[in-house]
Amino acid sequence: MGTRRKSRELALQMLFQADLGRQPAEEVQRTFWAERASVEAETRSFADQLFSVARERAAEIDALIEKHAEHWRMERMAVVDRNLLRAGVAEFLGFPETPRPVIINESLEVARKFSGPESVHFINGVLDGIAHALVEPGAGAAPARKRRKKA
């Protein structure tokens, strides 16, 4: 398993712990890493960065998720699913250099490991909607899709 995927899994676990335990970010990180001293520095660093973006921009991230998860309120979503979505959107916002399809694919792989099969379709749909709604950095508007000319 790649370093980034392992980092994404660890970030999900920290978000899950913070969500259920309603603990401050610093407390989650302290207790989480105390039990995982053998994790490589590069893996830990990216996990911490994802977790930090997700916590610091929580209101913005949750608003995007609720807007694109039609008929679903955050508190009604499965805990794993809502935190997978939070981690994915945090990566969209905090790491714009990572291609959005890569983020979506990685989120789906983590979902296959930690969530139910029906959740994969839900997470894919929500993240895809958010990815298309977010304006690329430096662009004035979302790119228009090319239309084929009729012959």
Image (cartoon, rainbow, N blue to C red):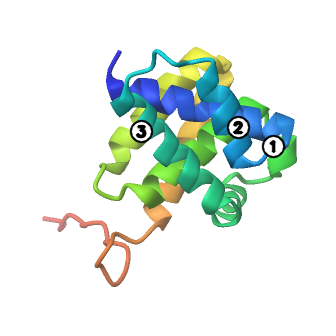
Question: Seen from this angle, which residue lies furthest left?
Answer: 151
Image point (61%, 43%), residue name: 85
Label 3 to label 1, Cα distance in Å?
20 Å
Q: Say which residue appears at 46% left-offset and 60% top-offset.
A: 93
Image quarter (top left, top right, bottom left or bottom right) of the N terminus: top left
Q: In the figure, 114 relative to 146: above or below?
A: above
Q: Which mark is residue 45?
A: 3
Mark sitting earlier along the chain (3/1): 1
Q: Are marks 3 and 1 in contact (CB under 8 Å)?
A: no
Q: Is residue 75 above or below residue 17?
A: below
Residue at x 51% of width, y 42% of height: 48
Q: CA distance from mark 2 to mark 1?
A: 6 Å
Query: Relative to residue 28, is residue 98 depicted above or below?
Result: below
Between the C-alphas of marks 2 and 3, the distance is 15 Å
Return the residue at label 1.
23
SS label for mark 2: helix
Q: Position of residue 87 (x, y in %)?
A: 56, 43
Q: Amino acid at mark 2?
A: Val
Q: Which residue is mark 2?
A: 28
Helix or strand or loop: what does disc 1 sit on?
Answer: loop
Would residue 81 be visible to someone looking at this image?
A: no
Amino acid beneath label 3: Ser
For the residue pair 46 and 115, the one nearer the viewer reads as 46
Q: Helix or strand or loop: what does disc 3 sit on?
A: helix
